[in-house]
Image (cartoon, rainbow, N blue to C red):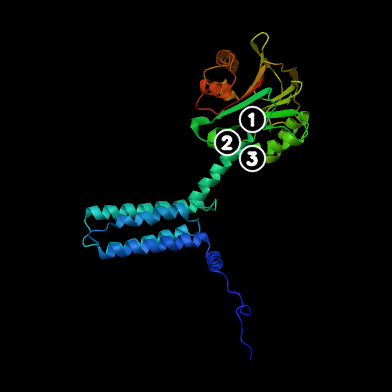
Amino acid sequence: MTARTDADRPAQPSRPRRVRRRRHLLPRANRTLVLLVALTVLITLVVLAWPGTAPMTTLMIPLLLGSLLLGPRQLPWFVVFVMVMLMLAIARQPELDARIVLAITILYALCFIVLTTSFRRSRLGVAGVQGESMLVDLRDRILSQGGIPPLPSGWLVEGALRSAGGTPFAGDFVVAVVPRDSDRLQIVVVDVSGKGEQAGTRALLLSGAFGGLLGALEPAEFLPAANEYLLNQRWDEGFATAIHLSLDLESGDFEVRAAGHPPAAQLDAGSGRWSVHEAEGPVLGLIEDAEFTTVSGVLRPGDAMMLYTDGMVETPKRDIGLGIDRMLGQAERLLRGDFEGGADRLVDALGSHNDDRALVLVHRR
């Protein structure tokens, strides 16, 4: 019989590996539920031990944490558990005067509100904090679509976006791309039907789709493809206006096409005057086989161009033509000799705060 050496013995899993295995067996959501149940039991024991000192309202701490951290499947059961613990605490109270009865009523009302919220949250399928992080991620994705890609040193392109009421979600968005192996900048400014949060979800979907179309298609094909995409969505309010700029970064040659959108405005550095380019085309998502006219031109050194949404120039008490004249007047004043930060200055100075506003400023230095 030979003695077994340490080398012959089977290797034992390391402690960190065993810990990770246990954590894998108990998902994070279940660990959170266990911790909240333990906290609730602990608070209940304290209330039962010192009913005249420890208030029953302390049970709202785990209830609030549960509403933030638990998913829609676990939260209803946890709320019922808190209500049972609350019943135990009530039975231990020395006397039930009007003040305590009112407090009990409020506590059960809060439990009912959290329970109702959990049923509504089941449509999304995530916990409160996780759902909020998802919305933040969606907002960041919309904003990142409007990021300006790296450009040659002779160009300055800025974008600014403000939503109705100051919320992070807007129905206006900007997409800008420079396709690989190309010296042509493609920018589209879109105004989705609706405002703020109401249009934010549609803006998210369209910004991703338009970004893919913009980098894959020839400039003349973009608006017809975007129109077909919107028609296929079959939304009740599935329309949008858009303006598309295709700019050659070497020569300065550009093409502008619009779909029911306010016209682009160009600054002629030689004369110091702004002019508008009226490109005609129907609103996206309403007419099949729509056609869009093209306005061509050149941006020479010192010239600039603005693309914007109707929130910049339109108000209930003012015609859009007068709004464009006012915007161009502000542009002459605010951009005189200094285009850096000009997009933000114009958006802050113009338009209605009750409407989404977006503006892109292109300047050839």
Assign a secondary structure to mark 1. Answer: strand
What residue sits 58% from the left and 71% below the top?
13
The residue shown at (70%, 26%) is: 152
Label 3 belongs to which residue? 205
Tell me the element at label 3: helix
Q: Earlier in the sequence, mark 1 or mark 3?
A: 1
Residue flagged by tag 3: what amino acid is it? Answer: Leu
Q: Earlier in the sequence, mark 3 or mark 2?
A: 2
Q: Secondary structure at mark 2?
A: helix
Task: Please state the horizontal and vertical placement of residue 220, each as a whole percent of the image.
Answer: 77, 28
Q: Is residue 126 visible?
A: yes
Return the disc, 1 or 2, that comes first in the chain's sequence: 1
**Residue 108 on image: x %, y %:** 35, 55
Q: CA distance from mark 1 to mark 3?
A: 12 Å
Nearer to the camera, 117 or 275: 275
Locate the C terminus and report the quarter of the image it occupies: top right
Q: Quadrant of residue 245?
A: top right
Residue, disc 2:
199
- Residue under numbered circle 1: 190
In the drawing, does residue 205 fall left or right of residue 133?
right
- In front: 231, or 334? 334
Picture coordinates of residue 28, whole percent (x, y):
51, 60
Q: Mark 3 Cα within 10 Å, few/some/many (few <14, many 20+)?
A: few
Count of marks overlaid on the render: 3
> Residue lying furthest bottom in this view?
1
Measured from the top left, where is residue 127 in percent x and y? 50, 52
Q: Residue at x 54, y 43 (%)?
A: 135
- 29 w.r.t. 200: above or below: below
Q: Residue at x 54, y 34 (%)?
A: 196
Inspect the image, locate mark 1, and give the three-letter code of the amino acid beneath it: Val
Q: Looking at the image, can residue 84 be seen?
A: no
Q: CA distance from mark 1 to mark 2?
A: 12 Å
